[in-house]
Amino acid sequence: MRPQRSGQSHWRHRWRHSLRVRLIIVFVLLGLAMTAVFLGGMQRAFSTGWRDAARPLVADYMDRIVAELGTPPDAARAQALVTRLPISIRIEGPVVNWDSHADRHRHGFGQRGEWLNRMTADGHRISFGVGTLPWEREPQGIGWITLALLLGLIVLAYAYVRRLLRPLDDIRAGAERFGRGAFEVPIPLRRRDELGDLAQRINTMANDIQGMLDAKRALLLALSHELRSPLTRARLNAELLPATPEGAVERAALLRDLAEMRDLISDLLESERLASPHVALHREPVDLAALVREVANELSGGHDIATESPADLPVLSLDRSRVRLLVRNLLDNALRHGAEGAQPPRVTLRKAGQGIELEVRDFGPGVDAAQLERLTEPFYRTDSARQRATGGVGLGMYLCRLVAEAHGGTLAVRNAAPGLAVTALLT
């Protein structure tokens, strides 16, 4: 039952999704309906209008045939008439009893199939009906030809509809490209009809969106770059303030705020560079296990982070500075949110096809399942991380995702129960 249901659901989905299939079915049903209406109307018109006009002519013709058969009726003449004309003759009487189609049942003339009967002077009853029609002599050939013509018309209609709706495929592919941020290749304009006009309007919209994104990115990069200089001067001036006991707390708070603003600007610049479709990676052979140990030693002295990696881990061509940023953000996040866990954070490296999976897990409280999908969004922080002591500005996980995607990989977040596990695939 399951394969049958899956097949039914597949065809139901195809019927709802494919505009071509629905148009072809509508055209075929419309053609059949028009043919049935036309044939029914013509048959009705001929049967009601011409039957009364043709009945006297047919009756007179039957009288002539009866006279030609003679008295008593001659079966040989009747056979000659049946061979020459598409009629059937049945003779019943005291002398001659003969049926031209005794081996099969034959219908009479007219809409109700009445037989035309004539009585001869010697008491014979001659009945006339429909004989072997010309198209009944080769019924299979005509049937196959009709079926072939019908299939040919359906194939031609499908080819025409497919060609007619081909711009929809181009529009769909173009929308997918524009959704990924690839605005360089516009939608091809194949025709000058409504679909061509729609493709042109979408291209215009894509150009406008690209212009707005470029302007936003340029403005953000310019502002971030220009803010670095006054922030550097402000930090320098704050460090040169007299270290009096009364102003030590205020001085430390000012330096912390200035450092946070500096990190925010750096993260903004890096996120805009990585989000650009033309991001340039400075790839070089990188021992990822050694890089992880190096960052772990810088953050915790190497005592609070456990690392696991196989001995035959391959050396990948990576952007060292960007991957270092990814590892540092993941470890810093694990140290901050897993500080109260039963175990220290753990880093696991393993081979995954042609790449390496880097998993960083902490043993803290974890994250609510409804917030997992949003952890890698820019400027998103969980409710438990909105404190200055434990939460950043919400760009760390976003930068990690951008770094992984820039290297052709992915970033996945899951609850490890206990704790949170983040897996980055690098290729």
Image: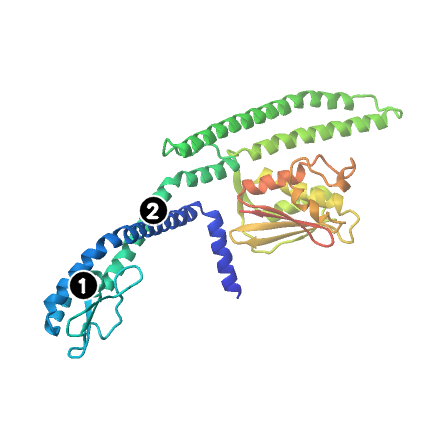
Q: Is residue 412 above or below residue 102?
A: above
> Is 208 on the left-hand or right-hand side of 396?
left
Examine the rendered structure and indicate whether residue 414 appears above or below residue 231.
below
Task: Evaluate whether residue 323 shows in this view.
Answer: no
| Circle 1 Cα neighbour tier, 10 Å, few/some/many (<14 / 14–19 / ≥20) | few
Residue depth check, mark 1 versus mark 2: number of the one nearer the observer = 1
Percent x, y of residue 205: 50, 29
Judging by the rendered image, the residue that carries numbered circle 1 is: 86
Residue at numbered disc 2: 157
> Is residue 77 visible in this depiction of the protein?
yes
- The residue depicted at 82 percent of the width and 26 percent of the height is 251
Foreground residue, 331 or 238?
Answer: 331
Q: Is residue 420 left or right of residue 158?
A: right
Residue type at mark 1 is Pro
Residue, far right: 246
Q: Position of residue 377 (x, y in %)?
A: 64, 39
